[in-house]
Image: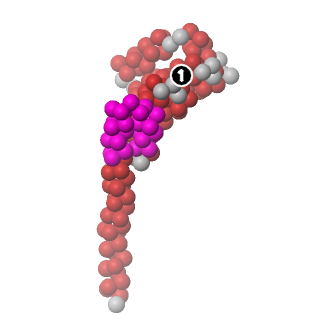
Amino acid sequence: SMAGALLAIVGLPGTAPAQYRLPTIVSSFRADSLHEAAATLLAAHRLRDAARLHRRSAELRAPEDPLGFRCLNEAAALAWFAGDRAAARVDLAKAADHALARGDLRSAALAYLDAAWIAQEQKNPRQVWELGHRAEMLADSPLLGASDRAAILQRIRRAPEAMRMAMRQRP
């Protein structure tokens, strides 16, 4: 009947969001499980494996989920201590992207600067400029508070001279 069809159409939007929420809940549960497994691997001193699980945990999270940022930051630290500088740099840049997705300009800028610092160690001036420039642009944002801006500028001032020069000169 026409009334039944209309009711089915009107009722659809109510059921559709429930269908979309389930994968999010499942992804969050899986991401949390991976995060916990990474902590277990870290306790066993398996740094590279723990970093890999932190990355996978972050991939399953929505960009605005603050735990995604945390997982990528932890992955970067573990990669750094395991001697994988390239992975640490990439993890920090992705962490910065996660911070930006949720509007945390300070965390994003500081993560970009840390990634630029690693790029400087790797003698990669293009990456130093790109990552450092992103941090500088964030430091100029009118959305940033004075204390957050000061923290970013302080980190830039503490950077090695070669890194600051590479940030100023586009390769």
- In the image, what residue occupies the spot 57% across and 18% down? 121
Nearer to me, 167 or 61: 61
Q: Which residue lies furthest to the top in this view?
A: 161
Q: What residue type is labelled 1?
A: Ile
Residue 58 percent across, percent down from the top left: 42, 42
Nearer to me, 45 or 27: 45
Q: Is residue 99 above or below residue 144?
A: below
Is 4 left or right of 97, judged from the image as shown? left
Nearer to me, 132 or 40: 40
Is 52 left or right of 17, judged from the image as shown? right
- In the image, what residue occupies the spot 31% across and 74% down? 11
Magenta stretch encompasses residue 161:
no
Tell me the quarter of the picture where residue 67 sits: top left
Q: In this view, does 24 lie above or below 73?
A: below
- In the image, what residue occupies the spot 51% across and 25% down? 83
Q: In this view, does 74 lie above or below 167?
A: below
Residues drawn in magenta: 32-57
Is 89 left or right of 15, judged from the image as shown? right
Q: Is the magenta stretch mostly helix, strand or loop?
A: helix
The residue indicated by pointer 1 is: 118
- In the image, what residue occupies the spot 31% across and 85% down? 3
State which quarter of the image contains the N terminus: bottom left
Label 1 secondary element: helix
Magenta stretch encompasses residue 41:
yes
Is 164 left or right of 80, judged from the image as shown? right
State which quarter of the image contains the C terminus: top right
